[in-house]
């Protein structure tokens, strides 16, 4: 992520984002965790999400696209921070 350092990003668990086949998914980085509802348009997945950040309800939006074997995207916290991210598929 380009806003938070890796120590924060992996604070509770190794950061991840998962997209399931039913247009739902989930993610966690640092103290932020959420559930997503996504739609695919070509190679891009746009999503909205809701969850918690330090025990406070939060929501937002984001997008992700696979480029050269990596998932590149951006996540926005409603009325808060936003950050680009890069993820690689776990084996």
Image (cartoon, rainbow, N blue to C red):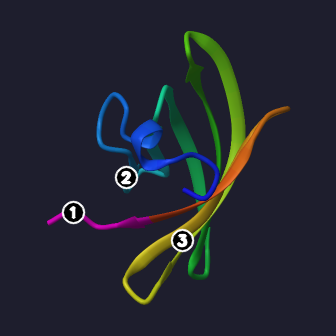
User: Quick check: 18 above or below 32?
Assistant: below
The range drawn in magenta is 87-91
Q: Earlier in the sequence, mark 1 or mark 2?
A: 2
In the depicted view, which residue is nearer to us: 20 or 63? 63
**SS state under label 3:** strand
Magenta-colored stretch includes residue 34: no
Q: Which residue is mark 1?
A: 90
Q: Nearer the viewer, mark 3 or mark 2?
A: 3
What distance separates the C-alpha of mark 1 from that of mark 2? Answer: 15 Å
Q: Quadrant of residue 80?
A: top right
Disc 2: which residue: 20
**Residue 46 in view:** no
Percent coordinates x, y for residue 61 in the rendering: 71, 46
The numbered disc on residue 72 is: 3
Query: What secondary structure do most residues of the magenta stretch adopt?
Result: loop
Examine the rendering and report whether any part of residue 50 can be seen.
yes
Circle 2: element type: loop
């Amino acid at each position: 992520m380009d806003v938070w350092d890796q120590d924060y990003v992996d604070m509770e668990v190794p950061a991840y984002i998962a997209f399931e086949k039913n247009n739902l998914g989930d993610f966690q980085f640092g103290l932020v965790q959420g559930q997503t509802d996504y739609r695919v348009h070509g190679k891009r997945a746009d999503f909205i999400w809701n969850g918690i950040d330090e025990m406070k309800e939060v929501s937002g939006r984001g997008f992700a696209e696979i480029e050269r074997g990596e998932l590149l995207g951006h996540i926005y916290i409603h009325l808060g921070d936003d950050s680009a991210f890069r993820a690689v598929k776990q084996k």
